[in-house]
Image: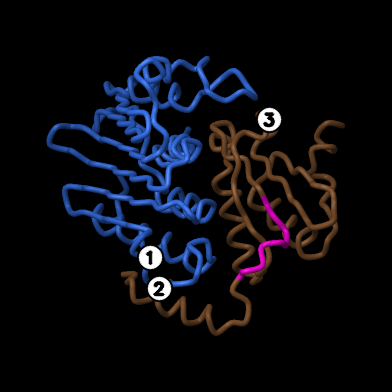
Amino acid sequence: MEDISLYILDLVQNSIAAAATLIEVSVIEDVQNDKLILSIRDNGVGMDSQTVKKITDPFYTTRTTRKVGLGLALVEAAAQACDGGVYIFSQPGKGTEVRVEFKYHHIDRPPLGRIDQTIAVLVACNPSIDFVYTHIAPAGRLRFDSREVRQRIGELSLDHPEVVEWIREYIREGIDEISGGGGV
Amino acid sequence: MKSLKELEEIRQRALESVNLRKERNGTRVVVGMGTCGIAAGARPVLLAFLEEVKKRNLQDVIVTQTGCIGVCRLEPMAEVYRPGEEKVTYVKLTPEKVRRIVAEHIVNGKPVTEFTIGAADEQ
């Protein structure tokens, strides 16, 4: 994957497959501690501790069509290459949190990339799921909550093309503002 | 800066237009969003479909996602379902190819054979 926003798009697919109705994505730029932290938290079916232990193994998957599951294995390799790691917290029936840490200033750390596109694609393709995106940077904070959008648009669906476009621009402008337009 | 107030204006405009996209039995475009698809460029492909649908105001076209379609080496892939017609699977997509597929297949009903899985198998 070229950037972190693509890893996020991939990891959220696991939450969707776990029948989540609320998916919270956070990006925390903890520059003071030299960490870039991603968190994907969902209220899906969750996993027992035995499954959690196996989940980053590329040859472990719950699906039956193929015998590989590369998403978490790939992000773990990328994080470990940047002195970071993947931490998974899950409870059956409650949901899962996948936390990925990168060393912020590591030369191999992928850039954040177009998180506005990732969130827009997720909302457009899954209008019945609610997404919350929080981005905490040294210069400020951005929060997007699709439940607030729903309240405003009434009977319109979240996948209405103009609504999707608004979401994309809202996040892009918000990130530009807190990162000074320089990218993360 | 974008404001939530603009969403109310979008809602108002959409309500005033006759069609509220309630009928969901038109064309369906399904883009493969497995790890393989995402790594190969499925996101810009899906965004290109969304952009074309918006630009052309195609009210009865739904763009959605699925997991790995099954032939990872041919990603990014998308399947187009038109009512009463056979499914068409497009492979090795790019935003440019998407624009042609929307114009020729989704709008004018003529599949772009050269981008289909059948054409890729012949190569």
Mark 3–mark 2 Cα distance, whole angstroms, equals 38 Å
Q: Secondary structure at mark 2?
A: helix
Which region is colored magenta? B21-29
Report the residue at 26% width, 55% height from top.
A142
Residue A25 in the magenta stretch? The answer is no
Which residue matches tag 1?
Answer: A149
Identify the image quadrant of the C terminus of chain A.
top left
Q: Residue at x 33, y 20 (%)?
A: A80
Display colour scheme: by chain
Q: Quadrant of residue A153?
A: bottom left
Q: Which mark is residue B70?
A: 3
Q: Locate residue A65: give its quadrant.
A: top right
Disc 2: which residue: B7
**Residue A157's x, y, as percent?**
51, 65
Amino acid on which the number 2 mark rests in the picture: Leu
| Disc 2 + disc 1, Cβ < 8 Å | yes
Q: Nearer the viewer, residue B26 or A37?
A: B26
The hue used for chain B is brown
* Nearest to N terminus: mark 3 or mark 2: 2
Q: Nearer the viewer, residue B52 or A40?
A: A40
Tell me whether the residue at label 3 lies in contact with that at label 1, contact meaning CB atoms closer than 8 angstroms. no
